[in-house]
Amino acid sequence: MKRKSWIFSLFLGMILLSSGTELLAEGFTLSGILDSKVSFQGSTEGSTPFLFGWEEYANLRLQTKIGDRADFYGAFNLIAAAGSSAIAAGGFSGTASNPFSASTSIAGDNYVAAMELERLYMRLKGEYLDVDTGLMRLGFGFGQVFSPSDFLNLRNPLFPDARPRAVLGAAASVYPEDTIKLLAFTTAPKNPFNANGKGFLMGISGDKHWDLASVQVLYSFESPQNTSEYGIHRAGLSFKADMELGFIVDLLYRYNHEAHTDIDGLSLSTGFDYSFFNGNFYVLTEYLYSGAASSTAKSIENQTGFSNRNYLCSTFLYRFSDYTQINLTILLGLDDISFSPSLTLDHDLSQGITLSLTGRVPLDRDVFTGNGLRGELGPQMTGTNGLVTAKVRLRF
């Protein structure tokens, strides 16, 4: 009952805030998305050959100006689900964990629901210096698929709808020139109940932009804790060139003295993209090398990471018209020859309303030969023989 009252109070507060924006601030904005999604998947467990899921997901964002020198940002996620979507709500704000814990969820007659705070921060603006502090997104790198240097919000093509995670921290941005940005940042430890300061993270980055190219360098230090007596160092480099052929290189090296990281601490992606037929046909390909001790490797902290070392992801997008397009994406594990092709058809029903139909089939050598050579992206490892999803998205 208390949780229901809390959610009701939040919505009541939003209504009062929106009705009194002229008194509180200038330029109040409410925006967001609402997804209504139904999914069917074949299970590899013989007792349950088919699974059904239904999910309603909303991301709501608030922004308001406070005078000429400050902005307020807030965002939260709402989700209601049933079936397989309630059992494992993969992609809820960028995590594959289940958000429906006993302390945060509400159970209805045929659904469970949860709410999550996604962003809550302020920006203080100066002529050459901006300061952000709070629960916010700190993103790095120019990679479109893997982007290893974006180590605070690692990506996985298997979760294309995942929203980037926020971190509790602060950042100061300096702009010596219009094409140069210098950033200093710090974040709280990954364990929010750690009160001794171990695992605190701090770092710096620099961006330089030209007409046809951009480069970013990054360094961060994570203070010593039980698993890293000397702390963890991270150094990254990201480069992109936008000519007729787009080119990208993105890498991050993670060094932990105790783990004897060596080359295993390297995570590197490189690729290209190109458009044909006046932009109607688009091709994107990226390769990822994920060292066993790198930030993109699968671990207790990074559940959506990669178990092997070499991966290739290719996307082929064709636009039939301004309203309809089809997208084929193939994620390939080169070490164990497993791959996961997905096909998505998008159609804009009207302005702000999009219908999407997606099919994904996990495959590996065991599917074709039956010799037990199971791959990371195959059906036995992912627990599904195939997935079909229908989704309607509203943007406002």
Image: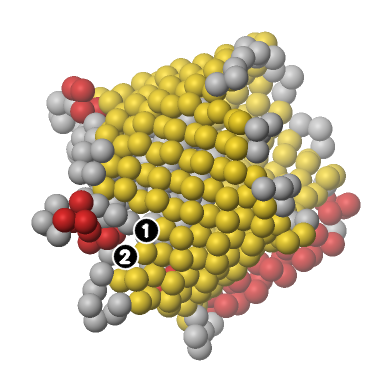
Residue 283: percent from left, percent from top: 52, 35
User: Disc 2 designates what residue?
Assistant: 385
Q: Can the viewer see residue 78?
A: no
Residue 122: percent from left, percent from top: 65, 40
Q: What residue type is labelled 1?
A: Val
Q: Residue at x 50, y 88 (%)?
A: 109
Residue 64 lies, with reference to residue 142, above or below; the image says: below
Q: How is the image coloured?
A: secondary structure
Q: Please identify the quarter of the rendering in which residue 99 is found.
A: bottom left
Q: What residue type is labelled 2?
A: Asn
Q: Distance between the residues labelled 1 and 2?
A: 6 Å
Front residue of 28 and 363 = 363
Q: Which residue lies furthest to the right in this view?
A: 22
Q: In this view, does 243 lie to the left or right of 169?
A: right
| Whether label 1 touches label 2, CB < 8 Å | yes
Q: Is residue 44 left or right of residue 72?
A: left
Front residue of 357 and 186 = 357
Residue 229: percent from left, percent from top: 19, 30
Q: Residue at x 28, y 26 (%)?
A: 266
Q: Which residue lies furthest to the left in this view?
A: 371
Q: Residue 149 carries which label?
A: none
Q: Is residue 144 left or right of residue 64?
A: left
Q: In which quarter of the image is the N terminus?
A: bottom right
Q: Which residue is drawn at 20% across and 44% down?
A: 336
Front residue of 146 and 107 = 146
Residue 370: percent from left, percent from top: 14, 59
Q: Please identify the quarter of the rendering in which residue 34 is found.
A: bottom right
Reading the chain from its start, which is encountered first: label 1 or label 2? 1
Q: Residues within 10 Å of mark 2 (few under 14, many from 20)?
A: many
Q: Which mark is residue 361?
A: 1
